[in-house]
Image (cartoon, grey):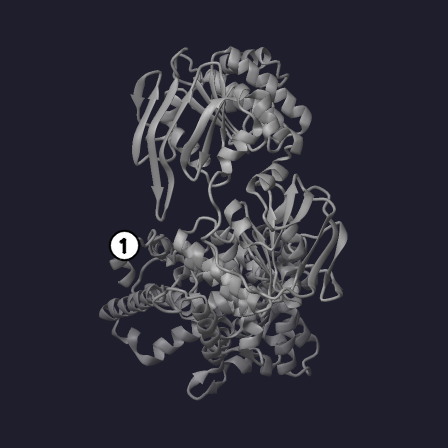
Amino acid sequence: MKNLIKQRETWLALAILLVIVLVTLRFSRFSQPANLLTIFNDTSILMMLALGQMAVILTRSIDLSMASNLALTGMIVAMLNAAFPGVPIPLLLGLSVVIGAGLGAFNGVLVWKLNIPPIVVTLGTLTIFRGLVFVISGGAWVNAAQMSPDFIALQRGVFLGLPVLSWFAIVVAALFYVLMTRTPLGRSLYAIGVNPTASVYTGIDVGKTKFYAFVIAGAVAGLCGYLWISRYVIASTEVAGGYELTIIAACVIGGVSIAGGIGSVAGVLLGALFLGVINNALPVINISPFWQMAISGSAILLAVVLNARGEASKGRIILKKAEAA
Amino acid sequence: MTDPILTLTGITKSFPGVKALNDVSLELYAGQVTALIGENGAGKSTLVKTLTGIYQPDAGEIRVAGQVVTLPTAHSASAVGITAIHQETVLFDEMTVAENIYLGHAPRNRFGLIDWRKMRAEARETLDAMGAGIDPDIKLKELGIAKKHLVAVARALSIDARVVIMDEPTAALSQKEIEELYVLIELLKEDGKAILFISHKFDEIYRIADRFTVFRDGEQVGKGFIKDTSQSEIVQLMVGRPVEGIFPARNAQIGDVVLEARGLSHPTEFDDISFAVRKGEILGFYGLVGAGRSEVMQAVFGLTQPSAGSLVLDGRTITPRSPADAVEAGIVYVPEERGKQGVITGEPIFKNVSLPSLRKTSKSGFLRLAEEFALARTYTARLDLRASSLSQNVSTLSGGNQQKVVIAKWLATLPKVIILDEPTKGIDIGSKAAVHEFMAELVEQGLSVIMVSSELPEVLGMSDRIVVMREGRMVETIENKGLKPETLVRLAAGILEEQAA
């Protein structure tokens, strides 16, 4: 099993390399380190969001509201910044995480206490959160001129040769790695995804564990709300519209099983990077945006087919010689 | 005497490690009800599955009206006129009654499409002939279980079945509904169907059956006419085998009461259950399947909440609201469905073992894999688990070894009371003995064991005392000294003493 997951990640990394090589043949500057770092930086937000989504999908749930959460939290901190430019940025940063986590907790409580299927809950909050963006902003934008210079500068700063935004992604990925492999909560996320019934009998509170997963996904979405707004320097009602599906796509390409219980941090990072590379490479070699969407879509289907084959039951091991293998 | 409609001869069916059916034969006659009787695990369900095309026998012959037939699929079984009515009906809730009756053989019109009008008319005709009073146009889910049985019978009539198998059809019915079912069976008899009636309940068998066949451990051990045979003769056939000898000797010191249940009740599952298990004791729970034993244990383990009654552990009243509470208090539960409720298949052995003990093996919120491995190694070694490594996926282990993983998981939490629900169900003889030996060791070390089991030899061989349950109530708690298997069966099945004597 472990070898299999490793293999899948290896193949994904090879696929990314292949795309880079192919594009470089047409456009030699594509593979220059500076450009690759730009792609990484461009993909940072997607990587973080996909990791949050993975925590939820592992528990046989799904969070469709992440992009709306991002837009709402982003709008709140942008409006706060516009109204009170004196509020320190680290405080706004912390606030975005807390607001996002709160919105995630709302999802989580509905799933946990009322036992509503996650897809229904988050389909509802997808619309509610997006609607609240309209309500609080009155449909107006917060633009660059209204934001304080510090608000915009933070993620653009460079630390040890990398943009701060990239560092955010690296730190979040490291935290997720520790969470998933080194904490009881991470272990529970996998356990309830693989076998919810046995998990109940083992004394794991399945509802509560799902609640935590939604809080984690919400917190990440909130953090990315601030990062997104300060990166694209515009807070509007349209921010990240439809992006929830890109997040899920990154998870699926990265080998996260929609049926729960299977997925790794490395896989999800590669899944997000794969989408990032495709989206960066195709315009460079003059492929129309329509074909970009078709190619991204095909990549998702291909990933699902490969994962399904990988997860297919091998049957019972009855032969002694097969057991040794 | 007429020839039988259905004849089985020399049917043998093996599963890895178990011979489920060994050279059995069976005859069913037109217009007669034959009762199939046997303990749990005697091979009754395997036989039903063989007859309905779900299992293929390894050897033997099936004849329908003298013709040898093979039944490679469920469809081929219904094609030769064999149909089964199961304990929980296997019909489709979202479809109408008429659709259920004619699913797979609906009348067609000249375009090859389903002729709805004809189908409804015929369904109504069949149902009216049975006096069922069911509207063929309503959805099946709106009917109660008894009415669903009627639909299943109507389906049997509509496909012109010659053999009708009824697998514990009364298990979920009320007394009134059972009476209605009897009327229906009479109807089927008059119609010339051969009926195989599987039941644990002697009153039913004596009420409805003409003949009987007794199975024990996958073999046919007796048959005859019900009217010529007394209940105690049949009980004798069911249990007639020596039970001593294969169980480990026990030298545990029995101490004070550890866990006591007082008047546990549940609105629908059980009523007024009281028992006490002492230190170093194995308390057996015996009863027929569906007597409510597992349900009581699930309440003790905090999976469900009893509506009345209390639990006292070491002199302290406890109210476990979740399995986590129960584990915390020192009560653990090894569930019956190993694959579904016991092990997390797809995860390695060590993760399964350490799952409920993660708080112990982690430090300031972080897991320590080395500690987990040490814990898993200690407890799996005590159980003599056979695996190539502790990182091996549990889904690749045999049933017996999976059971050991579940038990190791719970021992690692250092429990006071361990509840084993059908601990040796579906595992091979060698592993069974290992589990039994291990139970003896557990009580020697001062644990209290509650063992729910439907296997008579196991209950008699392992328990110090036995609680017998029937239909959600406690019948009796007996010391296991010189206890005869017949007594237990009688108590569990509700046969009166003087009748059997």
Q: How many marks?
A: 1
Tell me: residue A134, above or below residue A233: above
Residue found at x 65% / y 72%:
A98
As rendered, which of B256 and A217 lies closer to the eye?
B256
Q: Which residue reaches farthest left? A: A25
Residue found at x 57% / y 21%:
B208
Chain letter belonging to callout 1: A
**Residue B290 visible in rendering:** no
Tell me: residue B214, above or below residue B244: above
Q: Position of residue A145 (x, y in %)?
A: 60, 76
**Residue B335 visible in rendering:** yes
Q: Which residue reaches farthest bottom? A: A160
Q: Position of residue B232 (x, y in %)?
A: 56, 31
Residue B187 falls in image quadrant:
top right
Where, quadrant-wise, is the C terminus of chain B in this rendering? top right
As rendered, which of A108 and B357 lies closer to the eye?
B357
Where, quadrant-wise, is the N terminus of chain B in this rendering? top left
Residue found at x 46% / y 69%:
B382
As rendered, which of A249 and A292 lies closer to the eye?
A249
Q: Which residue is mark 1?
A: A319
* Tag 1: amino acid: Leu
- Sort mark 1 into few (<14), some (14-19) or many (20+) by Cα contacts within 10 Å: few
Q: Position of residue B92 (x, y in %)?
A: 52, 31
Residue B260 in the figure: left or right of residue B289: right
Tell me: residue B169, above or below residue B314: above
Q: Position of residue B185 (x, y in %)?
A: 55, 18
- Residue at disc 1, secondary structure: loop
